[in-house]
Image (spheres, grey):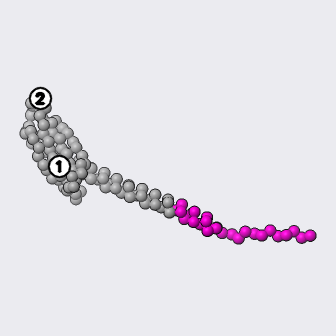
Amino acid sequence: MKPVPRRRRPGGFTLVEVLVALAIVAIALGAGLRSAGVLADNADRLAAVSAAQWCADNQLTGLRLARQLPGIGDSDFTCEQLGRSFKGQLQTRPTPNPNFRRVDARVTTEDGVPLVSLSTVLGRY
Protein backbone atom coordinates (compact mmCIF):
# COMPACT_ATOMS: atom_id res chain seq x y z
CA MET A 1 0.00 0.00 0.00
CA LYS A 2 1.23 3.30 -1.04
CA PRO A 3 1.26 6.05 1.57
CA VAL A 4 -1.18 8.83 0.94
CA PRO A 5 0.69 11.99 0.08
CA ARG A 6 0.18 14.78 2.54
CA ARG A 7 -1.28 17.94 1.23
CA ARG A 8 1.20 20.72 1.20
CA ARG A 9 0.08 24.04 2.46
CA PRO A 10 0.60 26.69 -0.18
CA GLY A 11 3.40 29.18 0.59
CA GLY A 12 2.72 32.79 1.51
CA PHE A 13 0.93 34.66 4.23
CA THR A 14 -2.70 34.67 5.16
CA LEU A 15 -4.74 37.83 4.96
CA VAL A 16 -4.83 38.13 8.75
CA GLU A 17 -1.04 37.93 8.99
CA VAL A 18 -0.63 40.63 6.36
CA LEU A 19 -3.13 42.91 8.12
CA VAL A 20 -1.38 42.46 11.48
CA ALA A 21 1.98 43.28 9.90
CA LEU A 22 0.50 46.41 8.26
CA ALA A 23 -1.00 47.52 11.57
CA ILE A 24 2.37 47.13 13.33
CA VAL A 25 4.15 49.11 10.61
CA ALA A 26 1.49 51.86 10.72
CA ILE A 27 1.79 52.21 14.51
CA ALA A 28 5.60 52.33 14.33
CA LEU A 29 5.57 54.97 11.58
CA GLY A 30 3.03 57.06 13.48
CA ALA A 31 5.16 56.98 16.61
CA GLY A 32 8.26 57.88 14.60
CA LEU A 33 6.56 60.86 12.97
CA ARG A 34 5.28 62.11 16.33
CA SER A 35 8.71 61.87 17.94
CA ALA A 36 10.30 63.67 14.97
CA GLY A 37 7.76 66.48 15.34
CA VAL A 38 8.45 66.78 19.07
CA LEU A 39 12.20 66.93 18.42
CA ALA A 40 11.70 69.71 15.87
CA ASP A 41 9.54 71.68 18.32
CA ASN A 42 12.13 71.26 21.07
CA ALA A 43 14.93 72.44 18.78
CA ASP A 44 12.90 75.52 17.84
CA ARG A 45 12.15 76.27 21.51
CA LEU A 46 15.83 75.87 22.43
CA ALA A 47 16.85 78.32 19.69
CA ALA A 48 14.24 80.84 20.90
CA VAL A 49 15.34 80.54 24.54
CA SER A 50 19.02 80.92 23.59
CA ALA A 51 18.30 84.03 21.53
CA ALA A 52 16.15 85.47 24.33
CA GLN A 53 18.95 84.87 26.80
CA TRP A 54 21.34 86.80 24.53
CA CYS A 55 18.85 89.68 24.48
CA ALA A 56 18.58 89.76 28.28
CA ASP A 57 22.33 89.45 28.72
CA ASN A 58 22.94 92.28 26.24
CA GLN A 59 20.62 94.59 28.19
CA LEU A 60 22.28 93.78 31.53
CA THR A 61 25.75 94.19 30.01
CA GLY A 62 24.71 97.58 28.63
CA LEU A 63 23.75 98.69 32.12
CA ARG A 64 27.09 97.49 33.51
CA LEU A 65 29.01 99.33 30.80
CA ALA A 66 27.11 102.56 31.49
CA ARG A 67 28.85 102.64 34.89
CA GLN A 68 25.89 104.42 36.46
CA LEU A 69 23.54 103.25 39.16
CA PRO A 70 20.24 102.65 37.35
CA GLY A 71 17.11 104.36 38.59
CA ILE A 72 14.42 102.32 40.32
CA GLY A 73 11.52 101.38 38.07
CA ASP A 74 10.56 99.40 34.99
CA SER A 75 11.52 99.91 31.37
CA ASP A 76 10.63 98.01 28.20
CA PHE A 77 12.95 97.01 25.39
CA THR A 78 12.81 95.10 22.13
CA CYS A 79 15.50 92.93 20.65
CA GLU A 80 16.09 91.01 17.45
CA GLN A 81 18.21 87.88 17.42
CA LEU A 82 18.41 85.13 14.80
CA GLY A 83 15.74 86.87 12.74
CA ARG A 84 13.21 86.82 15.60
CA SER A 85 11.80 89.74 17.54
CA PHE A 86 11.55 89.61 21.31
CA LYS A 87 9.97 91.91 23.86
CA GLY A 88 11.58 92.47 27.22
CA GLN A 89 11.30 94.34 30.45
CA LEU A 90 13.98 95.56 32.84
CA GLN A 91 12.83 95.80 36.45
CA THR A 92 15.15 97.73 38.75
CA ARG A 93 14.54 97.35 42.49
CA PRO A 94 16.34 98.71 45.54
CA THR A 95 18.37 96.51 47.87
CA PRO A 96 19.00 96.90 51.61
CA ASN A 97 22.33 98.53 50.71
CA PRO A 98 21.63 101.83 48.89
CA ASN A 99 24.82 101.43 46.83
CA PHE A 100 23.35 98.46 44.95
CA ARG A 101 20.34 97.78 42.74
CA ARG A 102 18.80 94.48 41.72
CA VAL A 103 17.96 94.35 38.01
CA ASP A 104 15.76 91.64 36.48
CA ALA A 105 15.57 91.22 32.70
CA ARG A 106 12.54 89.30 31.51
CA VAL A 107 12.21 88.38 27.83
CA THR A 108 9.07 87.12 26.09
CA THR A 109 8.04 86.28 22.56
CA GLU A 110 6.05 88.81 20.53
CA ASP A 111 2.94 86.94 21.72
CA GLY A 112 3.90 87.37 25.39
CA VAL A 113 5.06 83.81 26.08
CA PRO A 114 7.82 84.03 28.74
CA LEU A 115 11.17 82.66 27.61
CA VAL A 116 13.88 83.70 30.05
CA SER A 117 14.52 85.77 33.15
CA LEU A 118 17.99 86.94 34.23
CA SER A 119 18.89 88.84 37.38
CA THR A 120 21.96 90.74 38.48
CA VAL A 121 23.06 93.24 41.09
CA LEU A 122 24.67 96.48 39.96
CA GLY A 123 26.78 98.66 42.23
CA ARG A 124 27.29 102.39 42.38
CA TYR A 125 31.06 102.20 41.92
Horizontal arrangement in the rendering, residue 14 relative to residue 92 (left or right): right
Above or below, 65 against 14 in this view is above
Residue that numbered label 2 is attached to: 97
> Going by the picture, which residue comes out furthest to the front?
16
Q: Residue 61's image quarter?
A: top left
What's the residue at 12%, 39% (across, down)?
A: 92
Give x and y (percent) for residue 122. Answer: 14, 36
Give x and y (percent) for residue 121. Answer: 16, 36
Above or below, 90 against 5 in this view is above
State whether residue 61 appears in this view: no
Give x and y (percent) for residue 58. Answer: 17, 47
The amino acid pointed to by label 1 is: Gly
- In depth, the one of 26 and 100 nearer the eye is 26
- Indicate the quadrant containing the N terminus: top left, top right, bottom left or bottom right: bottom right
Q: Are marks 2 and 1 in contact (CB under 8 Å)?
A: no
> Going by the picture, which residue comes out furthest to the top?
97
- In depth, the one of 61 and 39 nearer the eye is 39
The amino acid pointed to by label 2 is: Asn
- Helix, strand or loop for disc 2: loop
Residue stretch in magenta: 1-25
Horizontal arrangement in the rendering, residue 116 relative to residue 92 (left or right): right
- Indicate the quadrant containing the C terminus: top left, top right, bottom left or bottom right: top left
Residue that numbered label 1 is attached to: 88
Q: Is residue 21 magenta?
A: yes
Give x and y (percent) for residue 90. Answer: 14, 44
- In depth, the one of 42 and 4 nearer the eye is 4
Q: Residue 91's image quarter?
A: top left
What's the residue at 22%, 43% (across, down)?
A: 117
What's the residue at 85%, 69% (across, down)?
A: 4
Task: Characterize the local packing of mark 2: few (<14), some (14-19) or many (20 or more) Cα atoms within 10 angstroms.
Answer: few
Total residue callouts: 2
Q: Earlier in the sequence, mark 2 or mark 1?
A: 1
